Image (tube, helix red, strand yellow):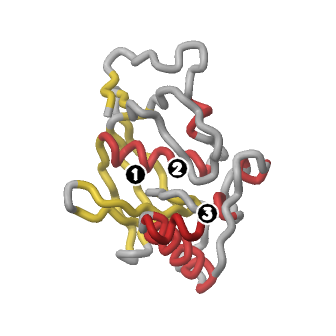
Amino acid sequence: MKLKLVKDNNPKIRKKSEEVSLPLSAEDKELLDSMFNYLVKSQDEEYAQKHHIKAGVGLAAIQVGYAKRMFVIYYEKAGQIIQYKLVNPKIIETSIKKCALQDGEGCLSVDKEHRGLVHRYYKIVMKAYDAIQEKDITITAHGYDAVVLQHEYDHLNGILFYDHIVYDTPFVQLPNEELI
C-alpha cells in the first residue's frame, strides 16, 4: 500500500478519527503494516534522503488520509526497540507532573518549524489493542515515551503539537515541568 502524507494545511488532518472494529480487517492490518514500514524506513538515513522524507517515530492513520483511531510507533531508546501498532487507544490516567521536549516537537505532517515548548503529561497510562502482540495491552509511559504516545493520540482528535504552544510565552517552563 502506497502512503501519501497529509500535511497540516489540509483540513483532513483536523478530522476526528473513528473507532476501528476488532478483529482487524485485512485492510486495516495492511494499513498498519504500511504505516509501520514507512516509519522504519524513514529512520534509514540513506532511504530517507533518496525519497525526500523526514525521519519519524510515530505515525497516525489520519496522517495518511484514514480517519481511523490507530497509530504506529517505532524508535530505539537505550538500545531497546520501542514499537507498537495501536488500535483504539485510550489514555486512562495522567500525572500531575508535566514535561516538554526542550528542543520542541516536530511532525511528519508539519513542514514549517513551530518553536516553543509543548506541555505534556510526564506519565500516562494508555489502553489499546496492539496489532504486534495481537492483544489488548496497558502501557505505562514516562518522559519521552509518554510524549510520543500523547503526540500521536492527539492526531486521533485532530490536534497538532503546535496547538499546545503558548505563543505569548513559548519557552516558559511550567512549575513542576521537566525538560527532556
The image quadrant that residue 160 belongs to is: top right
State the residue lying farthest toward the left.
79
Asked if residue 172 lies left or right of residue 8, the reply is left
| Residue under the image location 52 percent in, 70 percent down | 38
Badge 3 amino acid:
Ala
Residue drawn at the location 70% of the way across and 52% of the way down: 7
The amino acid at mark 2 is Tyr
Name the residue: 45% across, 69% down: 46
Q: Quadrant of the N terminus?
A: bottom right
Q: Is residue 123 above or below residue 36?
A: above
Kindly state the secondary structure of the residue where label 1 is placed: strand
Left or right placement of residue 72 versus residue 168 in this view: left
- The first of marks 3 and 2 along the sequence is 3
Q: How crowded is mark 1: few (under 14 residues within 10 Å), some or many (20 or more)?
A: many
Question: How dense is the environment of label 3, judged by Cα within 10 Å: few (below 14), some, or many (20 and up)?
Answer: many
* Residue 22 visible in the current orientation: yes
SS label for mark 2? helix
Which residue bears the numbered disc 3?
61
Q: Name the residue under label 1.
A: 126
Inter-mark Cα distance, 2 to 1: 10 Å
Query: Which one is earlier in the sequence, the residue at label 2 or at label 1?
Result: 1
Determine whether label 2 and label 1 are within 8 Å by CB: yes
